[in-house]
Image (spheres, grey):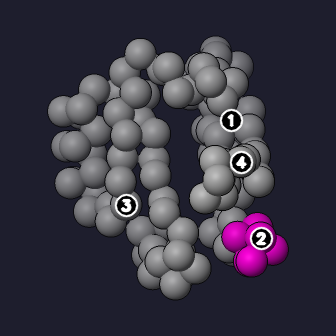
Amino acid sequence: MRDRFDEFKQRDATVLAIAPDTVENARTYFEKEDLPFTSLPDPDRAVFRQYDIQSTMVSLGQRPGQFIIDKDGIVRFAYLGWQQWEIPTIDETLRELDALS
């Protein structure tokens, strides 16, 4: 997503990563990886619970989730994977965004 971030900006989309970690750890990771989008630390997993994103042994940790929420706060696309590596591709995500236009 970092390498194609401009494509999200061109679509007037805001990318927000919710990190199940502390502010310090999230900041360190985002700076180290030079990620251009915003990270919201969620050490208590409050947001994760609201969106039913779980951490389970079956998925070897945090299950992935991806959501597209419109400007009115309505979830227009939701994906919950079972394994950490299961997440829609950038092309799939951009197609979902384009379909909302």
Looking at marks 2 and 3 on the same chain, the residue that comes earlier in the sequence is marked by 3
Residue tagged by mark 1? 83
Q: Tag 3: residue type?
A: Phe
Observer-side mark, 1 or 4, equals: 4
Q: In the image, residue 77 lies at what x, y percent?
A: 76, 53
- Quarter of the view holding residue 42: top left
Magenta highlight range: 96-101
Q: Tag 1: residue type?
A: Gln
Looking at marks 2 and 4 on the same chain, the residue that comes earlier in the sequence is marked by 4
Observer-side mark, 1 or 3, equals: 3
Residue tagged by mark 3? 37
Looking at marks 1 and 3 on the same chain, the residue that comes earlier in the sequence is marked by 3
Residue tagged by mark 4? 74
Relative to 14, residue 77 above or below: above
Relative to 93, residue 22 above or below: above
Q: Tag 2: residue type?
A: Leu
Residue sitting at 24 percent across and 32 percent down?
23
Residue tagged by mark 2? 100
